[in-house]
Amino acid sequence: MPTDARDFEHLYPFKLIIPTCCWSVVVLLFVAPFFFGLPWLWTCWAFALIFTVVSARQIMRLVVAIVSIRRAIDRYPALRAEADKALEVEASCSVHEPDVFHVLCIPNYKEPENLLAATLAALAEHTLAKREYVICLAMEAGEDGSDTKAERLISKFGARFAAMCYTRHVAQPNEMRGKLSNVDWCFSHAKEELDILELPANKCLMTTLDADAIIPELYFLEISRLWREYQDGTPFGERVPRERLIFGAPGLFERNCLEVPFFTRVMDAVWSVLALQQMASAFNIAFPLSNYTLSLELLQETNFLDAHPDAIADDSHVVLKAYFKTRGNIRFHAVWAPINMLNLNEGAWFKTLWERFIQAKRHFRGQHDFSYALRQTFVLCAAPRPLTALVLIKCVETHLFPVLGPLFMMGALPFIQLLDWIKPNSSELWGNHDWMRPWFVILFGLSLLGAYVAMISGFEYVRRLVNRRLYNKPSPPLWHLIEYVAIIPDTFAYIIIPHMITSTLSLMPCISQGGYKVATKVMADGDDDAAAQDLSSSAQELVKDQDRTNAKKADVVADADIDDNLEKP
């Protein structure tokens, strides 16, 4: 659908904020100690205190997320049994209709056919795929042979889903080429296919799914459960019905993690755990990670997605746009069924590292969402509610703190320590103050190191839990934990430098930041069958575990009855 250009007018003044903050910090790192040493110590201490509080909140949210994931996996056997029962009911009653239809949009541009086949094969293993899944392959008209590739996939997998079709995105004026414009085209044109199939709009949930994403069956079973549970209302009040919920799941990069350089592996792990913890929001204001689900009614209400160049981060922008278009009456609902994706892999070590840097620059173009949210708040007054303050804080935490934190940790604090070593007994820099000394500031800064260790420990627990119980695959050996020291060079190569470049270029419209480049993800032949088999065997193991648990409970009850009978005279 055409993007409403008015939402992006006069955005430039708001774009000044992030680069101004970042470059101001860079300059002050090396200038401030010589001109106002004591105030600079106070400033660094204040920032260290803020980052310590933010880190503590992140750790608490991570704990909530871990508990939620365990509970969701424990529910899996019962939900799968309900799905089997629904199939039995449908077999005996031809008029039975599903409570919800999952319409899956899979955007791709020059993706290997075996990669798409792996995604479709894993989906086809789901119990309700034939009954509830409508697959729409979002092809690009600019790719030669995209239609024939789609037709081959439909002929191979079409019979295993309720329906399967494809769209061909044709580039439109003033739109950003890439995933977002393709998904927008797919969603808007898939409506025509749904009308042909006579599927009611109020039962259609639209999911955008990366071409390399293996979504566990639990994801859709959980959404279907919530959809039924919230039929008469959600916990968020009458203004937020179930049609105004946006669902998303954490993401892991486990499919080929041992085939890429450990620098890439570590950066993607950090990216995953940061996205994971922020989904456990107490106020249900959070952003999905690449894959998400929302109702067709909400898409129509908000005029589908924006294909504007400043909306390149489709996952966070879809939440912000829906929030402001509905005047704050939407919520994000986490689905604790982690999705398994591929690391970027160019096939060669150094080429992969370089392409990961290019990908990082593209990711940080999502900082324009902060500008978009500020404009919607203060210019259009689109959502005059206290909750909007939390939305802005979430944007700051997502788009500004990831670079300010490392700048202070790896810039300001080491430089302060260096100056203190050079002039250990001099008060020329820091003044005469009883307790505000460099060691005190550095002590607070080092607390962030402890937060990093805690976050990585939580991530390692989640990945091993999910790999074992949800994907039935081994996790990397424990000796790989030493690789997390790579976060130091990764912070400069994949956070500070690309963020500074992207934020600076955003102020220079005359200089192109380049088009949307699809990340290459090499996958060995035959992995499509392996992914599907892993999911299938994992589901079977969970059901067997549940059966064993139920059998043990039955034995305990039987033993208790026998003891009661023996005690009777």
Image: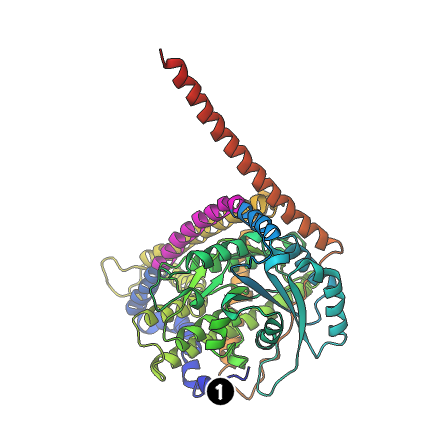
Which residue is label 1 attached to?
A: 5
Q: Residue at x 53, y 38 (%)?
A: 546
Quadrant of res 213: bottom right
Location of residue 545 with respect to 28 vertically, above or below: above
Callout 1 crowding tier (Cα within 10 Å): few <14, some 14–19, many ≥20: few
Of 187 and 112, nearer the camera is 187
Location of residue 41 with respect to 76 vertically, above or below: below
| Quadrant (top left, top right, bottom left, bottom right) of the C terminus | top left
Q: Type of residue at label 1?
A: Ala
Of 371 and 64, nearer the camera is 64
Classify mark 1: helix, strand or loop.
helix
Residue 71, percent from left and from top: 46, 46
On the picture, is 385 further left or further right than 307?
A: left
The majority secondary structure of the magenta stretch comes to helix
Location of residue 347 with respect to 300 vertically, above or below: above
Magenta span? 52-78
* The magenta stretch spans residue 61: yes
